[in-house]
Each structure stands twice: as C-alpha cells, then as structure tokens.
Image (cartoon, rainbow, N blue to C red):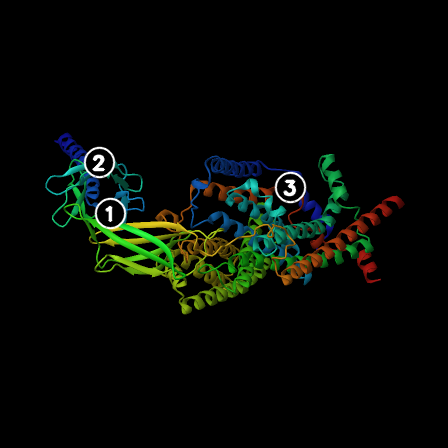
Amino acid sequence: MKSNRISTIIVLLISMLFVQAFSYAQEDEAEYDGYITKLSLSYIKNTNNVKTLRCVITAKKGEINLPLENAELKFYAGNEQSLLLGVQKTNNEGFASLDINNELKLPQDDSGAVLYRVEYKGLENSKDVTAEVSVVDINLELSLEEIDSVKTITVKGTRIGKNGEILPVKGQDLTIYVKRLYTNLKIGEINLSEDEGIGSTEFKSIPGDSVGNILIIAKIEDNELYATVEKSKEIKWGSIVSYDRTSKKRELWTNEAPIWMAITLAIFLLGVWYHLVRVFIKMRKIKKLGEQIEGVA
Amino acid sequence: MEYDSSKLMREFAPQIEKTSKSWYLVFATLLAFFLFGIFGLYTQITKGHVVTGMRDNVVWGVYIVNFIFFMGMSYAGALISGILYLFKSSWRGPVIRMAELITIISLFIGPVFILFCIGRLDRLYYLILFPRIQSPITWDVIAISTDLIGCIIFLYLSFIEDFAKLRDYKELQLPKWRKRLYKYLALGYQETPWQYKIISHTKNIMAAMVIAIAIIVYSVLAWIFGVTLQPGWHSTIFGPYFVIAAVYSGTGMLIVVMWIFRKVYKLEEYITEKHFVNVGVLLLILAAFFGYFTFSDYLTKWYGSIKMDKVLIDKLFTSEYYYMFIASNYLGVLVPIIVVGIKKFRTITNITIAGLITVVSLWFNRYLIVVPTLETPYFPIQDVRSEWLSYSVTWVEMSLILAGISVFCMLFMLASKFVPIISISEMEKHTGETRGLMRD
C-alpha cells in the first residue's frame, strides 16, 4: 500500500515535469506566432530611366520590430495574368530590390497603369503576405537654360498612351532639389501646365563645388499615380567655392586660436613651471647640504 | 597627538619587511583580474571596438566614465592632502599619505582608460605633434601631464623624510639594494634645521600648487563636456560641479582606504574614530555641496525645457535611468548626510559604508552624465540604426573596469611594501634640538 502511494507520487511528479516542459514549448510557439509580418513595396524611376521595386519586410510584436533576413520575395506585374518579374532575397535589414527589365511588355489596365505585386510565402504555418502598388509610367525631361539672363529650370512630363501616342502629364506638382552632402536641398516647386505638361522656375545662386558644379534634381515623390520619378542634370550654375587648406596647417602656435587663449595657457604653464623649477632647485640644495654633512662626518 | 620616531619605526618596520601569505593570495587574485582585463584588451585590439557597447552615436561609454572617476579621485586626493598640509590640520598625520597615494595611483590609471576608448591608438602621438590650442582635448593633455608631474613631486617631497628614517633605521631587515635605494631617494636628508626649513617651505609651495592645479585640471575635464553642444552637457556650472563631485568621491574613497588599512595593518591606535568623524564631516559638507550643485543643474534644465534637454531629463527622472538616478543622486547624497549628521549613527563602520556608497554613487553619477546624453543627440545621424542609439556595457569593457580596480588595489599594496602607509615624519614627535634650532 505504502509503495503504491510512493509510486503514485513519483508518477505525478514526473507527469508534472512533462506538463511543465510541454507548456513551456507552447508558450514559445505562441510568442512566435504573436509576431505580425509587415511588407511594404515602393516604386522608383531614377534619372537613367531605371525602374526599381523596393521592398522591406519586418516582423512586429509590441515594441519589437525585427527585419526578416533572407526572406524569399517574388515580384509580379499585372493583375489577372501575372508576369513574374523576378525573385530576390532580403538582406539583414529585411530589404530587397528588383530592377525591372525595360524590354518587358508589362500588362496595363485601361488607365495605362501597371500593377506591381510582391509576395512572401513565409513559413509553413504562417499566412502569405502581399503588397501592391499601381503605377503609370511617365518620363520627365529636364532642361536648364539661361533665358534673358535668368537661369531657368524647365520640366516637361510625358507618358505613352494606349496606342503609343505621347501624352502630356497635366497639372502635376514637382519639387526641385539641389544635391548637397547629406541630403537634397529643396530650392523650388513646379506645377506642370494643363495643356502641354510643362513648368518652369527660376534658379537662384547657391554654392557649388570648386568649379561651380551642382546637381539639379526634379522629383515627383510618393505620388498616388506615378509613385516616385526623378530626373537630374549637372550644370555649372553654382557659385565657386574653394577651400584653401594650405594656410590651415595644424600646429600649436597657430593664428587660429584667439590670443587670450594663448596668453592664458602661457600664464598657467609659466606659473606652474616657475614653481616646479624652484622646487627642483630647493631639492638640489637639500642634497648638497646632506653631502656637506656626510663630508664633515 | 605626537609620537616618538623610533616607536613608530618599530611599529611600521614589519609592514615593509614581512609579507604574509594572505597578502600574496590577495595580490594573486587581483593579478588574475588584471590578466582577464589584458585578455579583454587583446580581444578589443584584434576584433576592434565592435566588441564594446560603443557605436556611432554613443561614442563614449564606461571607459570615459572610469577616466572621469579615477581622475576625480586623483584630484580629490591632491586637494585633501594639499589642504590638510597647508592649513596644518592637527589630525592630518595618519590620513595624508593615503590621500597622496590615492592621488598618484588614480592619476596613473585614469588616463589609461582614454587609450582603451581611442579607436586609432597608432595616431596617439598626433596629440603631441599636432595639438591645437583651441581644443579642450589639448588643454586636458597639457593639464593632466602638468598635474602628474606636480603630484609626483609633492608625493616625493612628503616621502623624503620617511626615506631618511628608513635609511637610518639600522634594525630594518631589508636587502642591501633596498637600503641603497632609500639612501639615494632620501637626498642626504639629515633633518638639520636648514634642510627642515627648505623641505617645509617646498612642501608649502607644492601643497598650494597641487590645490590650484587640481582645480584647473578637473575644470578643464569638465569643460570638455561643457563646451560641447549636447543636451545636459552645455552648462556653465559643470566646472565647479565636477570639482565638487571629484572631491566628494575622493573623500569617500579615502574613508574606505583608511578602513581597509586600519583593519589589515591593525592601525587602531593611529587611525581612530576621531579621524573617521573628521573626514566624515568633510564628506557631509561635500555631500551638501554636491547635492546643491546637482539640484541647481537639473532644476535650470528642467525649467528651461529646451526640447532635447527635456527628452534627456524625462529619461533620467521618469523612465530608463530612473532607478540609477535615484540611487546616485539621492542615496549618494542623503546617506552620508544622515550617517554623519546624526550623532547616534556616527560610527566607524557606518561612516565607511557611507563612504563606499558615495564612491559607487559617484561612479553612476558620471555614467548618467556621459551615456544618456549621447543617447539623446540633437541631430541624429541619418538612417540611424536603433542599436547605435543605446548603449550597454559588454564583457570586454567590464574586464577592463575590473583590471583598473585591481591595478588600483595592487599599486596600493605595493606602495605599502615600499613606504610606511602612515607618514612617520608627520606623526613623529620632533626632537627638542630641531625645534629649538627652528625657533632660533
């Protein structure tokens, strides 16, 4: 009877251990499932007419937002009859991009827009994640001319119609930037006209590089119809900035430092070292006196 | 109280002559920590600073905290010993040497932490070759090196008389080279009236000098922060605030060191409760000053509510650094005031605990000055990664902190084997001959 009780207790304890272990495993799995996968897709057409799809995928739970590394993403164009554009894997920041081959004939809808889609299949038990962006392909022409001694930036927006005809991009707002070291500096805005899709703005002088070169950028950003499109050109419209570094040689007694600073430092050092030298002299005196005493002894 | 020189020599000779097994054991343990630090340093040199918690935004971490901490203790030692000497404090005898040793040892260790922090050690000599007078870093290099020379001279001057006593004490059981070394270092000092007069005068000069240099040097260190446009740093109060904080932490360390040597070398007769209470009262006064400066600094920043100052203060007062802030700026101020201020609590053990709390609190105070500010930049780097904005200490940094502390202890232990840990010349009763001649 007693041994039965003991064996029952042992079985209970062992089963509790298993239950504990099992419940830990469940918690781990539940925590993992709590992450929400987020996929974002954007479209950019750069100055060289290269169209790029950019994608970022993250897994979020509460305040934690982790990029998904090495995730396989499939990029498509078109809605019903999808065309596979390519497959890319994300980097350690959860980022992947794909340049669209300009030779491809992409399926368009009635308005001339192309629907781009990216898909992430995910793990075995998780749901697929999809992101889409619909874009009408447009071209920007940027011309930089001096008209009546006024430096003028002119932009023309066009797109290809259904039958191959060239149509103006009407009434669209653009921003004009100049490239600086860290970011682009906004210098003006242009509204493309309702008839020809042309707009212009005056350029006011700003500093360029050592020969006056600046890079002017016309940009439509995150637009519902056209996404992000930019065109840029380099021109010698900037004021020449030269940095004469030869006169700024690094040295202690340079003229760069204010005179009061040099005087303060000199007073400090002279004051301290005057006393230190006095102390050295006195120590030497102690030694001499000691030698005299030893000599007498 | 005055003591007889020969009695003191008899008392302190065994401390220099004999080394116990426990001394070797403690030294070996500290050496193991030091070697662990060397391994950490090797890892840092071979793998780069990525093994530390420092990143693009938070470019200063515990290395700089330790640099400020050790330099602070050094200046405190200089100030305390200088003031005690200059004002001929009657109870200075057993305390002054420990304060001097804290000065020198900390001054050797502190700047080494800068070397751990610098990414390109191979360019270190640029500081000497291409210094720019308008750079606070240059001021610091000049000030620290001047301070080091001044403190070494002051310490040496206070040792000369004891070196002479060690040279002349015939019963001292030491190897011949040690005796020859004492003879050489004693500079032929025979305690003649003229020599006594010269050395007293020289020590007076140096005591005044080290006080002045210590204030200048720690202010310069504070200005490295103060002249920088960063939230929490750009403050006119930082110079005096750093000086007070330094003396405060150094006084706490002095109490701890006094307690350790009193226990280890059984110096109850020399280091009495009176000494602890006197240094404790100094600690209390400094606690009040430190508390006042801290309150004043944070009050003006909080009331001004400049955007990034407010973000920083929110971190300190209410979120990430709340507990550390409370521990360092409330406990670190109130505990010493209560312990020393209320007579009932004023025991040697309690004052030592208060001193220890002060030392630890002040280390965290420096951490709160350095790290949260760098985590709150005015102008974040573009596309900054989240891990660049926060700092957490790594094992490599911890190993080097441990190494720094162990070297501090080891140098103290070695110093106690070279000279009496209590200045005999300060303690002794001068003979009538010397005094009489002095009067003449």
- Nearer to me, B198 or B53: B53
Helix, strand or loop status at disc 1: strand
Residue at the extreme left: A80
Check the residue under mark 3 and report the chain it is in.
B
Amino acid type, callout 3: Lys
Give the label, 2 or 3, closer to the camera: 2
Discs 2 and 1 carry the same chain letter: yes
Residue at the extreme right: A296
Q: CA distance from mark 3 to mark 1?
A: 73 Å
* Left or right of A219 in this view: B248: right
Check the residue under mark 1 and report the chain it is in.
A
Q: Position of residue B322 (x, y in %)?
A: 37, 58
Q: Of the numbered discs in the image, which one, if any, rests on residue B417?
A: 3
Residues packed near mark 1 inside 10 Å, few (<14), some (14 to 19) or many (20 plus): many
Check the residue under mark 2 and report the chain it is in.
A
- Nearer to me, A198 or B256: A198
- Mark 2 and mark 1 lie on one chain; the one further toward the N terminus is 1
Amino acid type, callout 1: Ser
Is mark 3 in CB contact (under 8 Å) with mark 1? no
Is mark 2 in CB contact (under 8 Å) with mark 1? no
Q: Circle 2 is placed at which residue position?
A: A86
Q: Position of residue B13 (x, y in %)?
A: 68, 43
Helix, strand or loop status at disc 3: helix
Q: CA distance from mark 2 to mark 1?
A: 15 Å
- Nearer to me, A35 or B40: A35
Q: Position of residue B417 (x, y in %)?
A: 64, 41
Q: Circle 1 is placed at which residue position?
A: A42
Helix, strand or loop status at disc 2: strand
Q: Is residue B54 visible?
A: yes
Is mark 2 in CB contact (under 8 Å) with mark 3? no
Q: CA distance from mark 2 to mark 3?
A: 76 Å
- Nearer to me, B314 or B79: B314
